[in-house]
Structure formats: structure tokens, C-alpha cells
Image: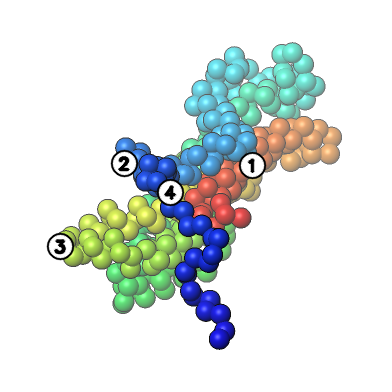
């Protein structure tokens, strides 16, 4: 007879031991502390970001740029326009003029500091307008679907097909004034399409989850579900894109101002200083170098922050 593999009868000489109940510690291993708060996506993201050097470097860059934009007078005793003297034109760097002077005798260091304000204001306003408009359109289209989704998606495609910079040039060329608010509105009018698509895709992936079904069963209205449940759980890609978009809009403003279409010439900005130094790029490249370096430094900070936030909020990225 073949040996039965499932026969559990002890063989001769084979002991069968059972541990005493007091020696079993499985209950200790399986114990769960009910006092600990459950982990969330945002707490996990913060824990991940706070342990990364790139996050603190980018945060320091952004903080420095914001402080300079708010209070440039704390870093220099001069003013960007007052004190300009033609006899002081194109002076080399010195203890009085750290970066030298431009062709109008203005201190380049002071103008670089004060130029941060206009660029940061335009970038922040444009990002806020884009997030509000694009998120609203994308969320409504993705959540309600049907004919409304079709109409909003086609409108988004039409605006997406319009060249961003070209449209801004055309609108600003006929604008009665070109303040920071006007430039931000124009940039946002043609820059909301990407975030609308991102929001629509995020809402589509969330709206059929169990917690949405539970909210419907409790009798909540569709608008309340969208605002209280769907949007908060779809905000991760929106935040990531907003961080990177802020740097993009700063570059867009500098580009338009460099072309003479952006901010008014009376406004001190990095794009305006780049345009003023264009004629002296061969003989005095430092006139363009310092505002260009400040612009690149600022955009680099926001791009690095966007990468860190993306890795922290994307569960797949954390597993890689």
C-alpha cells in the first residue's frame, strides 16, 4: 500500500508538543493600537518630502524669491529708477554697485531684486486664475459627463489648438493697459486647457469609487459630492501641475515683456531688463546675465518642487 501523505498520526518515537497558552505571543504581535490616527495621502506625502534634500533646496529657493518679491528694499538701499545717472553708465561691479550698472546708469543689482515682484505677481495670479477656471471646467465635464462633457471637451480642444504665446501677443497688443493683472488674465485665458484635461481625467478615475456611491446612498446632492468628496480626492495631480505651471507663467511673462508686448515699460521686470540689455549683449553681457540668472533660478526652484511633490503624491512613484 502506498504511504498516505495526509496521515497525521504520530510515528513511533516522534513527539507531539503543544505550547502552553501563556507562551503564545501571537496576540501581542497582532495587537493594533486604536489610538494611532490613520495615515493619509497628505501625511505620507509630507513624510516623504521632508526626508528629501531636493525638497528643502527648492523650498529655500522659493522662499528666498518670495521674500525678495515682497520686500526688495530689505536687500538694497537704492531704488531701481531713482539714482540712475548717465555718467555712471556701464560701471563694473564694485562695493557700491554689486552687479555694475546698465547703459542708463541704473544699478543692476537693485533692478534684479525689484524685478522679482512683477514676475512673481504675474505668475501667482495666472496660476490662481488657471486653477480656478480649469479645475471648474474639468471637474464639471468629468463628473456630469454626457452632453455637457462633450460640449466642454470640444471648447477645451478649441482653446488648446490656439498657440498660447501668439494669442497672448495678439490680445496684449490691443489692450489699453498692460498691468500685471491684465497680463495674468490674458495668460490664464489661454493657459487653462491643460489643467482642465488633468482635472477631468482625475475626476473620471474617482467618481465611481465606493465612497462616492456611499455618499449618493446617503442622499447627498451631486454638487455636494463633487465639492466635498470627488475634488479633494482628485487634487493631487492639480497641485503638481500648479507648482510647475507657476514657473511656466513666470517665463511666459518674461518672454512677452522681452518682446515688448508684456508689462508696461515703466514696470521693473526681468523681461524688461533682458530687453534693455539686448543691444549690449556683445560688449556688456552682464546686463542680461543677472536678470536671466534670477529668472532661471526662480523657475528651477518651482520645477524641482513640482518633481518632489509629484513623487510624493504618486503612490507608484514611491514604490519605484
Residue 148 occupies quadrant: bottom left
Residue nearest the observer in this picture, 211 or 141: 211
Measured Cα–Cα span from mark 3 to mark 2: 30 Å
Position of the C terminus, as image quadrant, is: bottom right
Circle on res. 19: 4
Mark 3 or mark 2: name the one nearer the start of the chain: 2
Where residue 315 appears, as percent x and y from the top left, is 51, 55
Rendered image coloring scheme:
rainbow
Residue at horizontal 29 percent and vertical 56 percent from the top? 229
Measured Cα–Cα span from mark 2 to mark 4: 29 Å
Give the side of residue 233 with respect to residue 265, left or right: left
Q: Which residue is mark 2?
A: 34
Measured Cα–Cα span from mark 1 to mark 2: 43 Å
Could you tell me if residue 299 is visible in this image?
Answer: no
Q: Which residue is mark 3?
A: 219
| Image height of 97 relative to 129, above or below | above
Residue nearest the observer in this picture, 276 or 270: 270
| SS for callout 2 | loop
Q: Please say if the residues under marks 3 and 1 sit with CB atoms less than 8 Å apart.
A: no
Q: Which residue is mark 1?
A: 300
Amino acid at each position: 500500500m502506498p504511504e498516505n501523505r495526509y496521515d497525521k498520526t504520530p510515528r513511533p518515537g516522534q513527539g507531539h508538543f503543544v505550547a502552553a497558552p501563556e507562551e503564545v505571543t501571537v496576540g501581542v504581535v497582532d495587537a493594533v493600537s486604536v489610538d494611532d490616527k490613520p495615515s493619509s495621502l497628505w501625511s505620507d506625502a509630507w513624510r516623504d518630502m521632508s526626508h528629501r534634500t531636493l525638497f528643502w533646496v527648492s523650498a529655500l529657493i522659493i522662499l528666498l524669491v518670495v521674500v525678495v518679491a515682497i520686500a526688495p528694499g530689505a536687500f538694497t538701499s537704492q531704488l531701481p529708477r531713482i539714482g540712475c545717472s548717465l555718467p555712471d553708465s556701464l560701471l563694473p561691479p564694485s562695493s557700491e554697485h554689486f552687479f555694475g550698472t546698465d547703459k542708463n546708469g541704473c544699478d543692476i543689482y537693485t533692478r534684479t531684486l525689484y524685478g522679482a515682484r512683477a514676475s512673481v505677481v504675474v505668475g501667482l495670479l495666472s496660476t490662481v486664475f488657471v486653477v480656478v477656471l480649469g479645475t471648474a471646467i474639468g471637474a464639471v465635464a468629468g463628473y456630469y459627463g454626457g452632453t455637457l462633457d462633450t460640449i466642454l471637451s470640444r471648447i477645451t480642444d478649441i482653446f488648446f489648438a490656439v498657440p498660447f504665446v501668439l494669442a497672448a501677443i495678439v490680445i496684449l497688443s490691443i489692450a489699453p493697459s498692460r498691468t500685471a493683472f491684465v497680463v495674468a488674465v490674458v495668460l490664464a485665458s489661454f493657459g487653462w486647457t491643460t489643467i482642465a484635461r488633468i482635472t477631468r481625467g482625475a475626476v473620471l478615475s474617482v467618481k465611481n469609487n465606493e465612497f462616492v456611491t456611499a455618499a449618493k446612498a446617503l442622499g447627498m446632492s451631486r454638487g455636494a459630492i463633487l465639492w466635498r468628496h470627488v475634488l479633494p480626492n482628485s487634487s493631487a495631480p492639480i497641485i503638481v501641475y500648479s507648482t510647475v505651471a507657476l514657473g511656466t507663467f513666470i517665463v511666459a511673462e518674461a518672454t512677452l515683456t522681452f518682446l515688448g508686448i508684456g508689462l508696461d515699460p515703466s514696470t521693473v521686470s526681468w523681461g524688461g531688463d533682458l530687453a534693455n540689455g539686448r543691444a549690449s549683449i556683445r560688449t556688456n553681457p552682464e546686463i542680461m546675465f543677472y536678470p536671466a540668472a534670477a529668472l532661471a533660478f526662480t523657475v528651477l526652484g518651482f520645477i524641482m518642487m513640482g518633481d518632489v511633490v509629484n513623487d510624493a503624491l504618486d503612490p507608484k512613484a514611491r514604490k519605484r
